[in-house]
Amino acid sequence: MTMNAGMKFALGAVVIVGSVGYLMASGIKQTGQYFLTPSELSHKIAVDPSFYDVGMKVGARVVPGSVMRETANQTLRFQITDGSATYPVTYRGLPPDTFTDSVEVVVEGRLQKDGVIHATDVLAKCGSRYESVPKA
C-alpha cells in the first residue's frame, strides 16, 4: 500500500503536534510551582510528609522584629506568618529595597526538613506606591 502526499502530510502533522504537546506538558510540570500561605503549607506537610524540598512560593507577612541581617555573607533571616502558621526563612542575596519589618512578601524557595524555607528569591510589596490618594 502506498501513501499519497495528503496522508504523509497528515501523519507528519499529527507527529509534530503530538511532540510539541508533550514537550509543553512536561515543561509546565517541571517549572510549575505551588503558591501557598503558611497555613496551607502547614496543612500540606501534615497530609504529605514528603512535600519537603519542593519548589514553591509562599505569600505572607514578615513577623515584626524577626529580621536579622548578616552583611558579611549577605544572608537575611526572618520569619513569615499569615496569623495562623509561622515559618523561618533564610535568603542569601540582597533583599529588595522595599523589604522592611512587617511588609507583605512572596518567598520563592524550598521548605527543608529542618522547618526552614531556604529562599531563592524574595519579593516585597510596597503598599505606599499602590494606595489610592485620599480625597480632600
Image: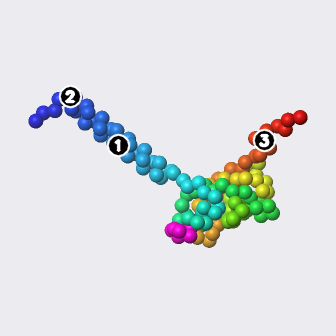
**Image quadrant where residue 23 sits:** top left
Identity of the residue drawn at 38% across and 43% down: 21
Instruction: Measuring from the top left, give residue 62's x and y in whole percent.
Output: 74, 58
Identity of the residue drawn at 33% across and 38% down: 16
Identity of the residue drawn at 89% across and 34% down: 136
Residue with the mark numbered 3: 131
Residue with the mark numbered 1: 19
**Image quadrant where residue 6 sits:** top left
- Dot placed on the residue nearer the N-terminal end, 1 or 2: 2
Looking at the image, residue 101 lies above or below residue 125: below
Identity of the residue drawn at 55% across and 55% down: 34
Q: Is residue 45 visible?
A: yes
Which circle, 3 or 1, is nearer the viewer?
Answer: 3
Q: Which residues are magenta?
A: 45-50
Viewer-side residue, 82 vs 106 = 82
For the residue labelled by badge 3, is the local secondary structure a helix, a strand or a loop? loop
Viewer-side residue, 75 vs 18 = 18
Quarter of the picture containing the N terminus is top left
Viewer-side residue, 27 vs 95 = 27
Q: Which mark is residue 5?
A: 2
Q: Is residue 117 visible?
A: no
- Dot placed on the residue nearer the N-terminal end, 3 or 1: 1
Is residue 78 rendered to the left or right of residue 8? right
For the residue labelled by badge 1, is the local secondary structure a helix, a strand or a loop? helix
Question: Disc 3 versus disc 1: distance between alpha carbons?
Answer: 47 Å
- Dot placed on the residue nearer the N-terminal end, 2 or 3: 2
Identify the amino acid type marked 2.
Ala
Q: Are marks 2 and 3 in contact (CB under 8 Å)?
A: no
